[in-house]
């Protein structure tokens, strides 16, 4: 399956390049090109096209038009011979091996890893490079949560809907988690920036509602803890992914390995994706044959 | 209540200024400023701050920092004496009268109307000005759908969750409709770009699922019709807002007055908001006292 037209990885890219590199990042809204032929003026812009398969016609269209305007273009893709790779000035290959799963998981991780590396390279900061080198060990530790995550998923096999709360760097995590829960486990999973959630959708909270939270050490943690406490007061059933043991104890908790905040989406997404996988299995569903989805991409 | 930190009106602004004025529009991600003190370099940018109350500290923070950098700033707000109005170089007052409702409705309409007027003014196109002048009559016609909308809402009073599908200009409509359904009627309403929906979340479709669609005449209509047909084949219970009688007949339909596509979000949001209102009433809820929401804005 080709990735959705608005990859969640781009949300991470928007945040990390803004927070760490002070770049203004605009989503391309590919339908502006495909439906209206309206490409913004992109003088002096770097245009990144992200597509696991490299075959998303809308993403290819934006890159082609951007190059025509003289913008600098780069493709982030898992297929170095794809149309997207060939259309861009530069190729950043994911090198994740063939994506065999219907629901892409490892290529999401590879995409955000590439964006983190890009941010580090742009900053030229040696400390960031060192933090990146420590990442593989943290990812291995994150994979070791699987047995615990599987147990939590089995306990929630009956859940029909849930809200997912995160903020800042983890908004992308919430969106990716929600998508996997929807396409694999058919759970109505609604991802929120915690800031938006408290201004309206918090009305949805009622005793027993399943709420999933992602909250790791950094400037967003205190606000996240506050909203998770409010949700808990509303007697929602909370599951939290955190590298902070006290925050984990706000509900069912999965303790994440501690990494710098900008890299935390890489370690957090692993138990999140595993949770979706085990929830689907606990519900007797086939993760390689989701309802209504074919491997063939149809474009509207 | 202050508006959520990511106003849906900004999504309309992003689309209309992109499609009609070829401007690259980036969301400001206010938490970048409030949590990380990271403001992108905004040389030569116009920075628009949208806040009904003008009291959102995050939006005010972005405008203040942008002005410090020498960017051109404008406030779109309903309170001309608010902090936001005072912080910006220019004030575009909504002049909608005091927003008395807990869930802002008329100020959403006023915000997108102002963005449409801004787009028309930037293009300097006389035909657009004329189309704007015809708008009040169309809005009146849209208000006249209320009795019919109330009936449809009563028929769906038992709905627990729904997907809302739209594309292009109407993605903002879907987001605003979903928010109103959540905060007033406690419906798990999930808004989608129709393009994203078919790449995964379509797995959620099952017989009886409530699906709401917004599809008006323009380049997005044929793709929207195709996906609504697929949803219908999955035997979902479809409700469609459209200015096309044949598209309305794909499910329960509300016929919208015909206006140019770029103005269609203004006429479409009225029956959408009325539907949320009547659904809340049909469920015995008080639209002026939603659960867990206070009028006092708390910032994370």
Image (cartoon, coloured by chain):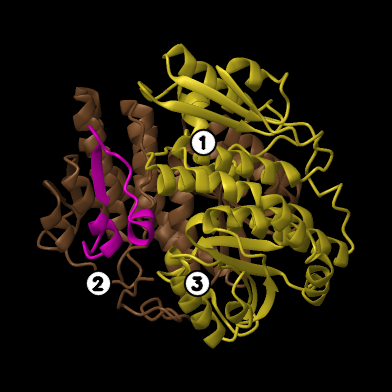
Chain colours: A brown, B yellow
Residue A231 position within the rendered picture, expressed as x and y whole percent measured from the top left: 69, 46
| Circle 3/circle 2 CB separation < 8 Å | no
Say whether mark 1 and mark 3 are on the same chain.
no
Residue A131 sits in which quadrant? Answer: top left
The one of A177 and B232 positioned closer to us in this rendering? B232
Crowding around mark 1 (Cα neighbors within 10 Å: few <14, some 14 to 19, many 20+) is few
* Earlier-in-chain disc, 3 versus 2: 2
Q: Looking at the picture, does residue B96 appear above or below residue A219?
A: below
Q: Secondary structure at mark 1?
A: helix
**Disc 3 designates what residue?**
A185
**Disc 1 designates what residue?**
B121
Say whether mark 2 and mark 3 are on the same chain.
yes
Q: Is residue A159 magenta?
A: no
The segment highlighted magenta reads: A32-61
Q: Is residue A36 magenta?
A: yes
**Disc 2 designates what residue?**
A100
In this rendering, position of residue A168 left or right of residue B274: left
C-alpha separation, residue under disc 3 versus residue under disc 1 = 48 Å
Residue A145 seen in render: yes
Crowding around mark 2 (Cα neighbors within 10 Å: few <14, some 14 to 19, many 20+) is few
Residue B271 sits in which quadrant? Answer: bottom right
In this rendering, position of residue A234 left or right of residue A264: right
What residue is shown at x 47% (from left), y 80% (from top)? Answer: A285
In this rendering, position of residue B3 left or right of residue B74: right
Residue B199 position within the rendered picture, expressed as x and y whole percent measured from the top left: 40, 69
């Amino acid at each position: 399956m080709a990735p959705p037209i608005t990859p969640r990885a781009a949300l991470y890219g928007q945040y990390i390049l803004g927070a760490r590199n002070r770049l203004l990042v605009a989503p391309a809204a590919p339908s502006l090109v495909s439906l209206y032929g309206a490409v913004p003026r992109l003088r002096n812009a770097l245009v990144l096209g992200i597509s696991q398969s490299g075959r998303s016609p809308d993403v290819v269209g934006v890159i082609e038009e951007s190059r025509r305007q003289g913008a600098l273009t780069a493709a982030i893709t898992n297929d170095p011979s794809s149309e997207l790779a060939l259309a861009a000035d530069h190729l950043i290959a994911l090198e994740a091996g063939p994506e065999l799963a219907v629901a892409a998981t490892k290529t999401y991780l590879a995409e955000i890893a590439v964006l983190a590396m890009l941010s580090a390279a742009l900053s030229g900061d040696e400390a960031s490079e060192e933090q990146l080198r420590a990442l593989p060990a943290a990812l291995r530790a994150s994979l070791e949560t699987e047995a615990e995550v599987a147990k939590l998923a089995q306990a929630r096999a009956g859940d029909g809907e849930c809200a997912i709360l995160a903020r800042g760097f983890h908004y992308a995590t919430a969106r990716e988690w929600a998508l996997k829960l929807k396409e694999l486990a058919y759970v109505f999973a609604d991802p929120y920036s915690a800031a938006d959630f408290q201004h309206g959708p918090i009305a949805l909270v009622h005793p027993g509602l399943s709420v999933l939270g992602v909250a790791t050490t950094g400037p967003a943690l205190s606000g996240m803890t506050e909203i998770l406490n409010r949700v808990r007061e509303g007697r929602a059933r909370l599951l939290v992914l955190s590298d902070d043991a006290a925050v984990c104890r706000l509900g069912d908790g999965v303790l994440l390995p501690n990494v710098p905040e900008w890299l935390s989406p890489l370690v957090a997404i692993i138990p999140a994706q595993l949770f979706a996988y085990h929830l689907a299995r606990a519900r007797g569903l086939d993760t390689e044959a989701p309802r209504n989805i074919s491997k063939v991409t149809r474009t509207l």
